[in-house]
Image: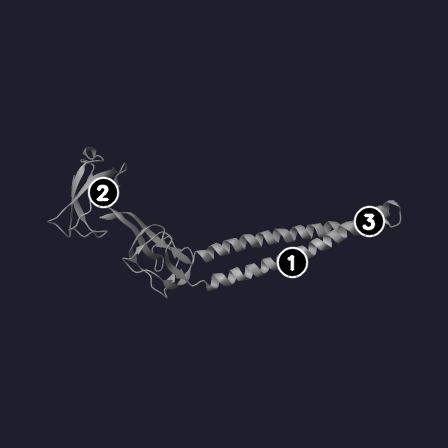
Amino acid sequence: LTYQTEIRMVSEVMGRVKGLYVKEGDQVKQGDLLLRLDPATVQAQVDALEAGLRQSKLAIDRQRVASETLATKWTRYQKLRETGVIDANTYDEIRSQNDQSKVELNSSIQMAIQTEAQLKQMREQLAKTELRAPINGRVTQLTIKVGETAVPSVTSIAGSDLMIVADTSNLYAEVNVNETDVARVVPGQSAKIVPAAFSDEAWDGTVETVAVSPRQIAGQGKSYPVKIRLKPSATLQFHTGMSCRAEI
């Protein structure tokens, strides 16, 4: 038995869980705050980059004034050189200073752009210290506690899985149909689903999808996963992960 959508929530940044605002079984709406990591370390980096960006902008203003002053001076020296008032060495020295000031100004501008990019990236990291619900649904599993450390990882190591949020509005059974029978299963067929926990009762359902590719089970033949949408039942209690059998 399974829900239509189950999302495994993981953290994209490392941090200690500072606030946990849901418990297992709670209903949540998309965008609700579920969990907050301690942002102190990331916030300090954001503050440092903001200070660095302010310094870079001050340096740009200072170098722009110096560059404009040298540009004016060089223009004046060009006229003096044409009349022969100054020698070639003095003229070349002023021209070199003017060119160098332009290079330094451009370098400062590029450094400021780089700092802005780093700041944007770090602000995104800061935003990721807050975990929000991706869909409307229910918290079906909670594996982290306040004070524990969340770890970004693609593997199931301690701290990588935080919780599971599921869309519980649609209930399904996923059954494996042997390759000798799958050709006779098509979407729209009716089905009876008997969960292992309630062997004397059954859900009515409808075949919704039949897998195109087989699933190989060790020691057994090939089977094809079939998804069956279940009709709500007033007497049966649904628990995701329950074993069941199906008659299609």
Name the disc covering residue 23, or none. none
For label 1, the crowd category at 10 Å Cα-Cα, with few meaning under 14, some 14 to 19 and many 20 or more, is: few
Q: Is residue 30 left or right of residue 94?
A: left
Residue placed most toward the observer, 188 or 32: 32
Q: CA distance from mark 2 to mark 1?
A: 63 Å
Q: Secondary structure at mark 3?
A: helix
Residue 174 image point, x, y percent: 23, 44
Query: In the rendered image of this protein, does residue 124 appear above or below residue 39?
Result: above
For label 2, the crowd category at 10 Å Cα-Cα, with few meaning under 14, some 14 to 19 and many 20 or more, is: many
Q: Secondary structure at mark 1?
A: helix
**In the orientation shown, which residue stands out farthest toward the right?**
84
Name the disc covering residue 229, or none. 2
Residue at image point 61% right, 53% down:
111
Query: In the rendered image of this protein, does residue 70 appear above or below residue 36?
Result: above
The numbered mark, 1 or 3, whose residue comes first in the sequence reads 1
Q: Which residue is mark 3?
A: 76
Query: In the rendered image of this protein, does residue 204 appear above or below residue 146?
Result: above
Identified by mark 3, the residue type is Arg
Q: Is residue 51 left or right of residue 245?
A: right
Residue 133 image point, x, y percent: 36, 53
The numbered mark, 2 or 3, whose residue comes first in the sequence reads 3
Q: Secondary structure at mark 2?
A: strand
Identified by mark 1, the residue type is Leu
Q: Is residue 138 left or right of residue 96?
A: left
Identified by mark 2, the residue type is Arg
For label 3, the crowd category at 10 Å Cα-Cα, with few meaning under 14, some 14 to 19 and many 20 or more, is: few
Q: Is residue 78 left or right of residue 114?
A: right
Residue at image point 80% right, 49% down:
92
The numbered mark, 2 or 1, whose residue comes first in the sequence reads 1
User: Is residue 152 visible to the viewer in this orientation of the structure?
Assistant: no
Q: Which residue is mark 1?
A: 58
